[in-house]
């Protein structure tokens, strides 16, 4: 029978006793002191947090390190509109630039004889094609391979009875897609363990070899070699490395919010002060949060809380692979109305290609309000004007600023993409995205 839970604020009493240790034939007695005095009450949540930090240290001391990846790109759709990193695959190691995507599970890169794959990129990064035949450590994954079944469980694998080759077909929300087959080869990286960097580390992983791309994936303007999925399924690189005892089943992701871009991507945990925590919704295919309300200038908008509820086809998702933010219609309309009513005496509303924009000649920080997305546990993500406005152009001497939030009609889905999940890692008021991308997208082993 399960023990009854402790109420918040309960005093956890410690028993003082003597411990006896036998050294050769001589007993030795040690006196144990209370870590918490008898008259001091400490909330259970504080004790659990102290244990969480201790368990993380135990992981680090048990030989599990963290892996740091460089982050490039920006949220600004006029510049890049995506974040990507560089990793090394195969023997000898070859560089591949891949988009960071928390909305999918699998790592895949372009392979030889790919149909629709760009050969050059407007990002001024070289595009490479992976060739399993030229890497002596590469091997194809058959349908009978247990690793193929990991993808079958989440519908990320397809099998053909004709050639027994484990393949995949992915379709993304923007209509683009890719298909190919799975291959196993070495991922090369540096690990950080106990403050020391261990170079030239490698581990075998399963990843996709793309032979076909469609939609926006065929365009050269922001082309990369593939997509690095950071989802929750067993086929993700995070899960694969954790199952081998190389890294913790956790990753930390922070996006820098100015036009210079960049950020932080670590397989493992980043310990930072002033982080506010909010829980993930359990048993969801994506990283869902408990968004509870939206405030504009400190005033909570009149939005039915059921709009933010989570079900099989509804919820709030954090997705670094989405550039903009998307609100359900029932939340979007009050949001736009609140902002427009505040700024309308000073600026001129302007509709541009279906987006709500404003013409103005003064600073946006002097006119536009602060926005707050309020999550469970008292966590709030504060957005100042430059966090949710995008400068598009100028018209008759006035600057055109457009709302980075878009409307999703007929669906109760809210997607928080790169525009509002960007944060400067070093500004104290900006730690919540480290929180959102680190805590909402974090795994800790079962204790």
Image: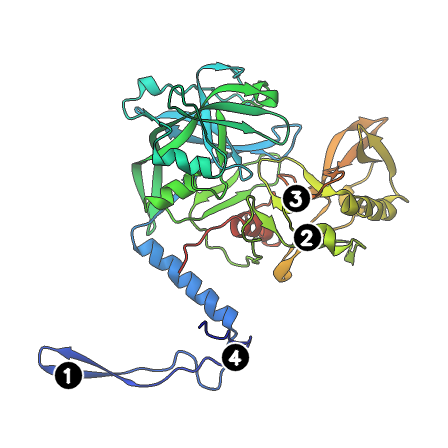
In this rendering, which labeled residue sits more in front, label 4 or label 1? 4
Q: Is mark 3 in CB contact (under 8 Å) with mark 4?
A: no
- Answer with mark 4 or mark 2, whichever residue precedes in sequence: 4
Query: SS for tag 4?
Result: loop
Residue 246 appears left or right of 180 = left
- Answer with mark 3 or mark 1, whichever residue precedes in sequence: 1
The residue at the point 41 percent across, 23 percent down is 161
Check disc 3: other Cα within 10 Å, few if <14, some if 14-19, many if 20+: few
Residue 285, position as x, y percentages in the image: 55, 44
- Answer with mark 3 or mark 4, whichever residue precedes in sequence: 4
Query: SS for tag 1?
Result: strand
Identify the mark at residue 313; answer none if there is no mark: 3
Identify the mark at residue 27; answer none if there is no mark: 1
The residue at the point 29 percent across, 51 percent down is 63
In this rendering, which labeled residue sits more in front, label 2 or label 3? 3
Identify the mark at residue 167; answer none if there is no mark: none
Q: Is residue 305 above or below residue 209?
A: below
Query: SS for tag 3?
Result: loop
Residue 253, position as x, y percentages in the image: 51, 44
In this rendering, which labeled residue sits more in front, label 1 or label 2? 2
Give the Cα separation between the discs numbered 2 and 3: 10 Å
Q: Is residue 166 above or below residue 307?
A: above
Residue 208, position as x, y percentages in the image: 43, 27
Check disc 4: other Cα within 10 Å, few if <14, some if 14-19, many if 20+: few
- The residue identified by callout 2 is 309
Q: Quadrant location of the N terminus?
A: bottom left
Residue 209, position as x, y percentages in the image: 43, 24
The residue at the point 46 percent across, 74 percent down is 3
Give the Cα separation between the discs numbered 1 and 2: 61 Å
């Amino acid at each position: 029978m399960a023990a009854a839970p402790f109420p918040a604020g309960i005093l956890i009493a410690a028993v003082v006793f003597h411990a006896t240790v036998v050294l050769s034939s001589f007993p030795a007695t040690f006196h144990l002191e209370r870590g918490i005095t008898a008259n001091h009450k400490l909330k259970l949540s504080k004790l659990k947090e102290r244990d969480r930090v201790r368990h993380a240290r135990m992981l680090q001391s048990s030989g599990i390190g963290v892996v740091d990846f460089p982050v490039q790109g920006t949220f600004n759709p006029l510049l890049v509109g995506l974040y990507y990193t560089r990793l090394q695959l195969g023997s000898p190691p070859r560089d591949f630039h891949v988009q960071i995507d928390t909305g999918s599970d699998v790592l895949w890169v372009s392979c030889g004889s790919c149909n629709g794959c760009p050969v050059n990129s407007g990002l001024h990064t070289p595009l490479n094609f992976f060739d399993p035949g030229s890497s002596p450590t590469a091997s194809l994954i058959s349908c009978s391979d247990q690793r193929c079944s990991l993808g079958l469980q989440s519908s990320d694998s397809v099998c053909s009875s004709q050639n027994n080759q484990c393949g995949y077909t992915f379709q993304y929300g923007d209509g683009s897609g890719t298909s190919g087959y799975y291959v196993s080869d070495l991922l090369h990286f540096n690990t950080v363990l106990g403050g020391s960097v261990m170079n030239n580390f490698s581990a075998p992983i399963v990843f996709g070899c793309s032979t076909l791309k469609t939609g926006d994936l065929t365009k050269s303007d922001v082309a990369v070699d593939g997509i690095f999925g950071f989802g929750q399924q067993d086929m993700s690189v995070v899960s694969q490395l954790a199952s081998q005892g190389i890294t913790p089943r956790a990753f930390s992701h922070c996006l820098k919010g100015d036009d210079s871009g960049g950020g932080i991507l670590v397989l493992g945990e980043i310990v930072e002060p002033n982080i506010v925590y909010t829980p993930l919704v359990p048993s969801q295919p994506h990283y869902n949060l408990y968004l509870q309300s939206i405030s504009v200038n400190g005033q909570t908008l009149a939005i039915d809380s059921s709009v933010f509820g989570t079900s099989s086809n509804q919820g709030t998702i954090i997705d670094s692979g989405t550039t903009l933010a998307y609100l359900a219609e029932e939340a979007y309309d009050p949001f736009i109305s609140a902002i427009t009513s505040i700024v309308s005496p000073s600026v001129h509303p302007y509709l541009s290609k279906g987006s709500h924009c404003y013409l103005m000649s003064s600073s946006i920080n002097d006119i536009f309000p602060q926005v707050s997305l309020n999550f469970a546990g008292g966590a709030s993500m504060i957005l100042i004007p430059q966090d949710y406005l995008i400068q598009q152009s100028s018209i008759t001497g006035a600057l055109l600023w457009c709302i980075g939030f878009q409307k999703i009609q007929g669906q109760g889905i809210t997607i928080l993409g790169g525009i509002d999940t960007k944060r400067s890692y070093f500004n104290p008021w900006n730690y919540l995205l480290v929180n959102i991308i680190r805590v909402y997208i974090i795994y800790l082993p079962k204790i």
